[in-house]
Amino acid sequence: MSQPILTFASLLLHFQSAFSKPAFYRFFLLSVGWLIIPGRHAITSALIALGLSGTLHHAAFHSFFSRGNWNAEALGQHLFRLLLTLLPEDSVLAVIIDDTAVQRRGPRVFGTGPHHDAVRSSHSRKVLLFGHCWVVLSLVIQLPGLPRPYALPLLFRLYRNKKRCPEDEFKTKTQLARDLIDRIQRWAPRRTIHLMLDGAYCVETVLHDLPDTVVVFGRMRVDADLRGTLADRLTQRAAKSTPRGRLPQKGLPCPKPKALATDPETTWTTSLVQLYGVTRSVQWAEQVACWPRVFGERLLKVVVTAPTKSRPQAEAFFCSHADVLAVAVLESYALRWPTEVTFREMKQFLGFGEIHSWTAGAVRRMVPWVGLLYSLVVVWFSQVQSQGVTTVIPLRPWYRHRRGPSFEDMLRTLQNTLRDPAFLKVLGNAADFKQWIEIISPKQASRRRAA
């Protein structure tokens, strides 16, 4: 068996403890089959790609998702532990929370409803999509040999419309996002987390009472109510000889981002900023203020960018630590973009929007599983580049801006590797697979070396 195949098998072995032995066999088969499917994705298509459609019954693989005794969140935790081994110790964890919608129809499909389609909508025209909306937490990681950072999804939460679920089960997107933040904190209580959020998640529900180890980089409204600290205002009030009226509850008003952008006395600074992989010249102004409605009395670094031809309106960004440099605020917020690329690539190449499951168990398990496969493709490709694997890249001379292999190239390379007839023959027999797994398992290998 080739070393690239063994490398991919070792990655799947990280999740062995999350399943029983029969379930892990199905997990392994489905993972390989789903990745080598040449066309539209489905469970039966995975069996056909493996050459097992006439050998193994498809009902067992459908039941693996709908009635299986395993937890999708446990897979995210195992993936998180795997990714931590690829990062330097005590490194900062860059985390993104965002949502994406996929179209699904059918009266029996669990969790469907109307959602805002951000891809097809514009400022003047809002488009609704009927299907599923997922709130996703991803870890941004720059792996060796890859041209750009990748957002690898760890946790998924299905958002259900209030009218389509029991009242005691309803949670808003922001409540689901806070659940994800609390979960990642429990997994890494001592690590510093840089949390990148879009403006829709920069609200009190998500950000209240966050510990100092979580540094938030986000976007704020240009009419946000900014204030000075309440302590400074109380000090000024006490300095008066005869203070009158009730005690103030907020600090003195500070210029709003929109007012700061239009004030002719504002001091603007021009800097070269690395945004979305490109160095750009950005004109910005900054101030330190509180945002009582969201962060209470915590001082924030607020950065306002000047209007440009491409963006005629001023934009405001912030960091929950006031001592962070303005350029770092803009560059850190730009790290949100890899999650948008991840959503697009999962939909285009891994069947994220083609899943035909309809029961509650299958709906809640298949999407996190597809996200796991996306992460494994990226991690595998980073590891096998030193093993002499040939990257399968079609000749496309019109792509002159290419800087390295794309995710499609990584997936095509993995497909070419996994279609080894000897490997597929081992997968087709449960007894041969069990024996092969015992041989390559790290625990079994360590026992053999000790003997």
Image: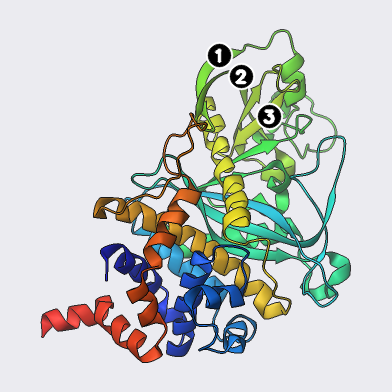
Q: Earlier in the sequence, mark 3 or mark 1?
A: 1
Using the image, tell me which numbered label, if any, was put on residue 284: 2
The residue located at (31%, 65%) in the rendering is 7
* SS at badge 2: strand
Q: Position of residue 126 (x, y in %)?
A: 86, 44
Please tell me in which quadrant of the rendered image residue 417 appears.
bottom left
Q: CA distance from mark 2 to mark 1?
A: 6 Å
Q: Position of residue 387 (x, y in %)?
A: 25, 55
Please tell me in which quadrant of the rendered image residue 21 appears.
bottom left
Tag 1 residue:
270
The residue located at (12%, 82%) in the rendering is 450
Tell me the quadrant of the picture where the C terminus can be found: bottom left
User: Looking at the image, do the residues carrying marks 2 and 1 touch, with CB atoms under 8 Å apart?
Assistant: yes
Q: Position of residue 44 (x, y in %)?
A: 60, 77
Above or below 311: residue 234: below
Tag 3 residue:
316
* SS at badge 3: strand
Above or below 248: residue 327: above
Type of residue at label 3?
A: Ala
The residue located at (52%, 36%) in the rendering is 332
Q: Earlier in the sequence, mark 2 or mark 1?
A: 1
Q: Earlier in the sequence, mark 2 or mark 3?
A: 2
